[in-house]
Amino acid sequence: MKIIMLGAPGAGKGTQAKKLATKYGIPHISTGDIFRANIKNGTELGAKAKVYMDQGLLVPDELVVCLVVDRFKKSDCEKGYVLDGFPRTIPQAKELDEALAKNGDAVEYAIDVDVTDAEIISRMSGRRACVGCGATYHVKSVPPKKEGICDVCGANLILRDDDKPETVEKRLKVYHDQTQPLIEYYQAKGILKSIDGSIGLENIFKEIVKIVEA
Ligand code: AP5
Ligand code: MG
């Protein structure tokens, strides 16, 4: 099962990708999470990525594609994977297609979670992320049991640097300019499925399950 989650920043890609990964026993591959782990561990890749991420810009394609293609080589990817935040540009999508085609493979579903810009801005300001394990919460819609503390690992919850309002606006613009064209790209391939992202977490998940089990 090879799934791509599409959607604006804050649309809920990560939330749904984690649920899919758990249900189907496939890895959740988030390029954003990979970069944040690299930043936390002080790697060279992390230092390079941080410069772009903090400004709400995309990390250059050449730093992203090899990372993902390499990740596919791990044995846990044999049954498939759910990609979250990749591809994010047309060149990334084309490189992904080429890399998969070498093994006679292709993406099966591109699932777009559609949310208005106004809703995105409200979600991002309420999102809290765990500094320990990366789990995400929302102060209103997905609150932790104890305020400011992760249910999973007990570490502190923070507002991500790039979730500050001025950066969110920039990320939305970058999304509309560089990532939204992927919707047409996957539509032309006949694998695009669009879901209304305002129907609540569990309903969105049910819709996705219906699509992949159809
Ligand atoms: P990344 O980490 O991928 O950020 P993003 O795309 O901006 O997406 P988010 O993680 O912010 O949102 P999400 O859609 O996962 O939403 P979530 O489920 O958390 O990337 C960060 C940066 O890394 C990029 O800006 C870029 O610089 C770089 N990067 C990464 N990949 C790259 C690539 N391929 N190429 C180049 N650069 C790359 O949900 C959001 C909030 O809403 C949460 O609080 C959640 O609890 C809540 N929520 C979720 N669903 C619902 C719902 N249905 N109803 C109400 N609340 C909900
Ligand atoms: Mg995410």
Image (cartoon, rainbow, N blue to C red):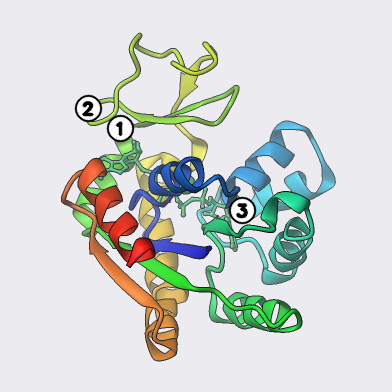
State whether label 1 is within 8 Å of ligand 1.
yes
Which residue is under mark 3?
A: 31
The residue at the point 28 percent across, 69 percent down is: 194
The residue at the point 70 percent across, 49 percent down is: 76
**Marker disc for residue 203:** none
Mark 3 → mark 2, Cα distance in angstroms: 26 Å
Q: Are marks 3 and 2 in contact (CB under 8 Å)?
A: no
Residue type for callout 3: Thr
Q: Secondary structure at mark 3?
A: helix
For residue 143, side relative to residue 41 (left or right)? left
Which residue is under mark 1?
A: 126
Which residue is under mark 2?
A: 140
Residue type for callout 1: Gly
Report x, y in % for residue 207. 25, 57
Q: Earlier in the sequence, mark 1 or mark 2?
A: 1
Q: Secondary structure at mark 2?
A: loop
Vertical placement of 177 versus 153: above or below?
A: below
Q: Residues within 10 Å of mark 2 (few under 14, many from 20)?
A: few
Q: Are marks 1 and 2 in contact (CB under 8 Å)?
A: yes
Report x, y in % for residue 54. 57, 47
State whether label 2 is within 8 Å of ligand 1.
yes
